[in-house]
């Protein structure tokens, strides 16, 4: 069969520029393999060191899915009802964010303790110190957008509505149940896995909520799934058939949802200037060092923009710009803030910002775009507006349900791209994760054998 169309990026970030432990401004650099990763209203990234060592245990094989019918009737004498059919799990992978102001320190502590994203000297000591130091300023930023991140609320709603659609359109794999797996805020990946175990899940799809793939977002979430699932398989006998939706940047439903929201936003401009509105598609930037390793994120974001503008028949002038650069190193540009300033100098005052790499509101839309960039532009006399985020929009819910439905139908383990590392990859864990995902040895005995060996 032809390869799946390439199908990464809701960031709930922090604030305060920091490089290592040194603060250089109001935002904080989120280390990573040079990743699109930010804190608060802006973002940052630190260079990632090579992972210290390959994990000692061999990868636990993922198993390809064979559609299951209802569970067989129990053999016990006199029992007439079959066992309930376990749900098909849909793991909604995302970065996450502190749900309340009290959660901010724990969020930062998990982030700075993660050696997959940053390697600090004496990390067990330095990570808590940096998290404690940054917590007050990050709390201030979240306080300005309502007292916490809305990303869990939106992810829950998206998952519930998506599974309702799937239960109707995919009765063979019904019931379907969403499980949230955040990287740095609860529910974490291990929380999702424990819930799946309690529900008796035997078939699951790891579904990235970042439409465009990056090693720092979807890649990081998959590395965490590999580690946690391997642990639980050995310790608790967790035994699940997995497949992965690792990207979906040009899916027609996603493109249509973006286009519909853009058309609605354009109608809000006065009729006499509506045709002259300049569209800036804004996505989280990446350090050029990461781009040069071969991270596919820039080209996948550009592909989304191209398909959206094709849908809009190229009705307006537009550019793809990049937000949240931190520090003096070269980052992917042009920057969103600088682009707004450039348009102002050219006399272009009517601008629509479209967060093209985020599928729900979080601190980078609500704080960085709304309270920083747009507020600054309006102070200069510009009419800059932001396109609504997708959140629980009906078109978007149908789109993500279609992504999962199509994935179930074609039976692929993942996209063709996922099996291959970036040409300049320096993280050995990526190799282990890709082997884990692409493995198809999948008899149930395989998972039990690995558990027994431990």
Image (cartoon, rainbow, N blue to C red):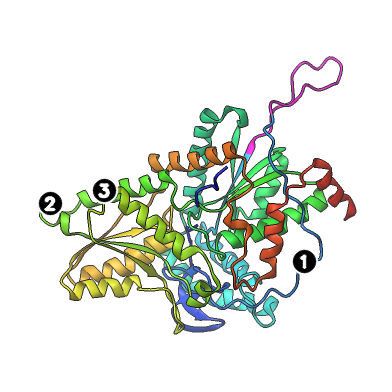
Which residue is at a point 60% across and 62% down the rendered structure image?
220
Label located before the other in sequence (1 or 3): 1
Numbered mark located on residue 442 in the image: none
Say how many tags the image has: 3
Front one among 129 and 433 = 433
Q: Is residue 5 above or below residue 334?
A: above
Q: Quadrant of the N terminus?
A: top right
Q: Earlier in the sequence, mark 3 or mark 2?
A: 3
Specify whether 447 is left or right of 162: right
Q: Is residue 103 above or below residue 29?
A: above
Residue linked to disc 1: 55
Res 349 quadrant in image: bottom left
Q: Which mark is residue 263?
A: 3
- Label 2 SS: loop
Q: Is residue 294 above or below residue 232?
A: below
Magenta-highlighted residues: 69-88
Q: Nearer the viewer, residue 368 or 292?
A: 292
Measuring from the top left, give residue 405's x and y in whole percent: 53, 37
Does label 1 or label 2 sit earlier along the sequence? 1
- Residue for badge 2: 271
- Which quarter of the picture shows residue 108? bottom right
Q: CA distance from mark 1 to mark 3?
A: 49 Å
Query: Mark 3 packing: few (<14 Cα in 10 Å), some, or many (20+)?
Result: few
Residue at 77% x, 56% y: name it: 231
Q: Tell whether label 2 touches label 3 (CB within 8 Å).
A: no
Distance, label 1 to label 2, CA atoms, is: 60 Å
């Amino acid at each position: 069969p032809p390869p799946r169309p390439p199908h990464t990026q809701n960031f709930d970030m922090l604030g305060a520029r920091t490089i290592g432990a040194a603060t250089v401004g109001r935002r904080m650099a989120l280390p990573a393999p040079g990743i699109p990763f930010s804190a608060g209203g802006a973002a940052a990234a630190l260079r990632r060191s090579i992972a210290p060592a390959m994990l000692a245990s061999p990868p636990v094989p993922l198993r390809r899915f064979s559609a299951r019918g209802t569970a067989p009737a129990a053999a016990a004498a006199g029992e007439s009802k079959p066992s309930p059919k376990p749900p098909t799990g849909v793991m909604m992978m995302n970065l996450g964010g502190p749900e309340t102001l009290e959660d901010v320190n724990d969020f930062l502590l998990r982030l700075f303790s993660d050696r997959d994203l940053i390697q600090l000297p004496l990390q067990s000591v330095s990570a808590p110190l940096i998290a404690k130091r940054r917590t007050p300023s990050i709390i201030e930023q979240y306080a300005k957008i309502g007292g916490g991140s809305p990303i869990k609320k939106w992810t829950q709603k998206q998952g519930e509505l998506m599974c309702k659609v799937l239960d109707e359109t995919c009765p063979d794999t019904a019931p379907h149940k969403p499980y949230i797996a955040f990287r740095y805020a609860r529910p974490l990946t291990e929380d999702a896995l424990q819930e799946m175990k309690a529900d008796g899940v035997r078939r699951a799809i790891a579904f990235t909520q970042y439409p465009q793939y990056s090693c720092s977002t979807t890649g990081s979430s998959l590395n965490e799934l590999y580690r946690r699932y391997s642990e639980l398989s050995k310790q608790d006998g967790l035994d699940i058939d997995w497949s992965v939706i690792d990207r979906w940047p040009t899916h027609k439903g996603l493109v249509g949802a973006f286009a519909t929201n853009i058309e609605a936003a354009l109608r809000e401009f006065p009729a006499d200037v509506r045709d002259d509105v300049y569209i800036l598609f804004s996505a989280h930037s990446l350090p050029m060092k990461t781009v040069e390793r071969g991270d596919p994120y820039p080209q996948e974001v550009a592909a989304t923009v191209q398909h959206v503008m094709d849908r809009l028949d190229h009705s307006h002038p537009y550019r793809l710009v990049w937000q949240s650069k931190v520090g003096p190193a070269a980052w992917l540009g042009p920057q969103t803030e600088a682009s707004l300033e450039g348009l102002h100098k050219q006399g272009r005052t009517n601008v629509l910002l479209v967060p093209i790499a985020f599928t729900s509101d979080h601190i980078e839309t609500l704080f960085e775009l709304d309270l920083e960039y747009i507020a600054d532009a309006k102070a200069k006399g510009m009419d800059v507006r932001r396109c609504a985020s997708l959140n629980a929009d009906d078109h978007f819910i149908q789109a993500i349900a279609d992504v999962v439905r199509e994935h179930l139908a074609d039976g692929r383990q993942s996209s063709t791209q996922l099996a291959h590392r970036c040409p300049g990859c320096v993280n050995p864990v990526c190799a282990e994760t890709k082997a884990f995902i692409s493995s198809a040895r999948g008899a149930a005995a395989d998972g039990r054998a690995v558990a027994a060996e431990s």
